[in-house]
Image (cartoon, helix red, strand yellow):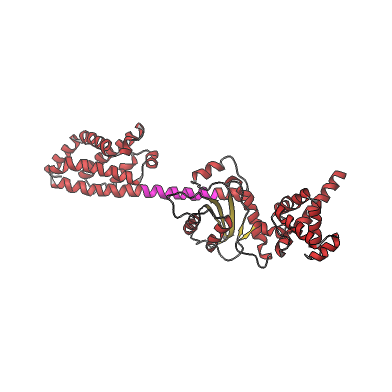
Amino acid sequence: MDRTKEQELAWLKTITGELSTRIITRLDDTLPWYGNMPPSRRSAVGLVAQTGIASFIQWYEDPSSTPWIASDVFSAAPRELLRSISLQETLQLIRVVVSVVEERVTPRSEALREAVLHYSRDVAFAAADVYARAAEARGLWDARLEALVVDSILTGESDDELPSRIAALGWHGEGEAAVLVGTAERSVDVDQLRRTARHAGADVLIGLQGTRLVLVLGRVEAQPKEPTLASEPLGFLEIAQRLADGFSDGPLVLGPAVENLVDASRSARAALAGVAVARSWRHAPRPVLADDLLPERALAGDGLARRTLIEQIYEPLAAHSGELLETLWCYLDNGRSLEATARELFVHPNTVRYRLKKVSEVIGWNATGAREALILQSALIAGSIAQHQGRRGKQR
């Protein structure tokens, strides 16, 4: 090392404290976010600046022996500091440090000016590397956490920690949720699914388990500054239709809407049961509602489907009016013939029409359609069996 460089190194070491003071003062004067930080984090930022100065002096002494010394600048920062300031704010910090050092150091010699420029470039790349690694680790953690949440929803084994895990994922869905289940290749574009859901005004959790693809959907309230969201809230079926292209060929089933994401396991169970039997409906739409597959699910032994048929169809009709239940029985048993039903009940066909309209108003299903008639007849059978078993149980 020549004598001039030795003198410059000695001089740099004497002004280290002065540089640190100037940097802290400049940060206070030029960066509002720095002044708003709590004292502990302000101290951590100051420590990073001081470490940068010391690291520069060490690097200037022998650049070849420590090629990665710039990365050591950020090793002094507490982990929480990386989470509290953004990459943009970090680059602003580096700019302030470099400008202060340049103002004080570069007038002394051209060699020092070039050294500052070279070192500041290394520090900038080191900052980008630190944040890239942090983002990668965060992405891996989020993916594992998302898979855990989706698995908990599918199995119904939720615990008290599920809401906090959902919050940690940054879930933006408001109110109701629903689960969409189908198949997909391992190479499915998950990011495209998220973009499609976002444009449809929905948030989504994604679980890819082998060839089974599970999407947990929740609607997002449109904000004035977010024109990409649907202007009018879409129903879950419409959202599922927009996402259908992301799935492979095969059954695609949407579970019923539930009150919130924590209760989504009920929607997931219905969707999974629907996927298992969807092929038995020859002309099933895609996607198909799990509740439109209630007869097939009940025949396959799905207890949830049987309870749904009884609770949503049989019990409301029985509670409303015995004549509605009797009229529906007769109408379905007579092949959906108004005249035959009227003859059996000794009423006018218009009376039958009126009662069938009332049935539709009470339960939401229309008995005059072939598919809905199958659902209603399945509900009547399931309800009669349950009622008969209940009576036998009381007699015992």
Q: Residue at x 21, y 40 (%)?
A: 100
Q: Residue at x 29, y 44 (%)?
A: 92
Residue 122: say if magenta: no
Q: Horizontal and vertical percent for residue 344?
A: 85, 62
Q: Residue at x 27, y 49 (%)?
A: 122
Q: Residue at x 47, y 54 (%)?
A: 229
Q: Horizontal and vertical percent for residue 112?
A: 16, 45
Which quadrant of the view contains residue 84? top left
158 with respect to 145 (left or right)? right
Residue at the extreme top of the image, as rendered: 39
* Residue 396 visible: no
The magenta region covers 131-148
Q: Nearer the viewer, residue 353 or 316?
A: 353
Dominant SS of magenta comes to helix
Q: Horizontal and vertical percent for residue 90?
A: 32, 44
* Residue 7 visible: yes
Q: Quadrant of the N terminus?
A: top left
